[in-house]
Image: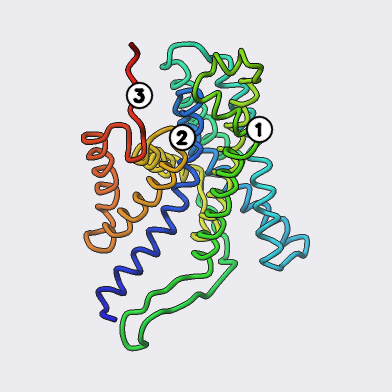
Amino acid sequence: MPDSLLQAIQQVVNGLTLGSIYALIAIGYTMVYGIIGMINFAHGEIYMIGAYLGLIAVTALVLLGIDSVWLLLPLALAFSVIVTSGYGWAMERIAYRPLRGRHRLVPLISAIGVSIFLQNYVQLTQGARDVALAQLIRGGWRLGEAGGFQVYISYVQAIIAVVAILFMTLLTLFVSRTSLGRACRATAQDRVMARLLGIDTDRVIALTFVLGAALAAAAGILVMLHYGLVNAHMGFVVGIKAFTAAVLGGIGSIPGAMLGGVLLGLAESFASAYLSTQYKDVVAFSLLVLVLLFRPTGILGRPEVEKV
């Protein structure tokens, strides 16, 4: 197999890894928008808090004498998801619910304010410097001849793919097979009619924030595991890119958020390899501009039916 093809395969692997993380965060954006029509710009900070919580959990468990990686990771993931879900619920209850029904600009400003507040809150409690964690899982698989280019797939990349697929599958089953999932879909289609039919729409909206926060926490844990580095500002850029992924796939569509995340990850990976790492953001946002120009509703988005 020629080296050029192996290099392309390596970029596909890298792009899918990055895209899985974007997709997990983008689902939170698209769920909130699909139900209440609002962009939660503080969602990136929830992802950042999830990464910090995972780091704190791993450190605490190691100090308690638990050194098995396969025990550390599930416990840290569970802790981060539970606590971060609480952050998501509190954020909706305090910062967004009182503003529901106001002009759309009002909750948008509130979301930006929550984002700034969470960044500074983490800086005050955890410090402004980068916090590093020793690599917990080493090794991987190599494909290709020893004398030429080899495709490297780390164990961490495999874990990221498995966890992302697992969470996305569970969310899809939840939305399609459970009564709460049907309530979410009904609220997204017509909130007033859902309320008339006896659905507690406030509960559904709070549940949406909780689920989005849980997925963002999972993404934060995976990033912490992969890069071993967290800081208080890591959520801003990644949050913007995840929002871009949601728009690419079709804002309000869960499959669209997954597809948009994967496409954005692949675009950044190939741009870094064949152009320069300095151009990866240019390529990513240029892709967004092209989609908005030629398909404003996104790849899987549906245009709104005009009212008669």
Please determine whether, in this image, residue 177 is positioned above or below residue 277: above
Q: Position of residue 256 (x, y in %)?
A: 41, 41
Give the label on residue 84, or none: none
Q: Residues within 10 Å of mark 2 (few under 14, many from 20)?
A: many
Chain-order first, disc 1 or disc 2: 2
Q: Are marks 1 and 3 in contact (CB under 8 Å)?
A: no
User: What distance separates the C-alpha of mark 1 from that of mark 3?
Assistant: 26 Å
Closest to the camera, between mark 1 and mark 2, is: 1
Residue 30: image tag:
2
- Asked if marks 1 and 2 touch (Cβ < 8 Å), the reply is no
- Amino acid residing under circle 3: Glu
Say whether disc 2 or disc 3 marks the residue closer to the N-terminus: 2
Distance from disc 2 to disc 3, alpha carbons, whole Å, reads 16 Å
Foreground residue, 151 or 131? 151
Q: Residue at x 45, y 15 (%)?
A: 106
Rendered position, 259 above or below 12 = above
Which residue is outermost to the front?
A: 308
Of 131 and 43, the residue lying toward us: 43
Identity of the amino acid at label 2? Thr
Q: Is residue 44 above or below residue 78?
A: above
Q: CA distance from mark 1 to mark 2?
A: 20 Å
Where residue 94 appears, x then y in whole percent?
Answer: 61, 21
Q: What kind of residue is marked 1?
A: Ser
Residue 305 percent coordinates (x, y): 34, 21
| Residue 179 numbered mark, or none | 1
Describe the element under mark 1 as helix, strand or loop: helix
| Label 2 vs label 3, nearer the camera | 3
Sequence-earlier tag: 1 or 3: 1
- Dot 3 lies on which element? loop
Quadrant into which the C terminus falls: top left
Find disc 3 in the rendering and name its residue.
304
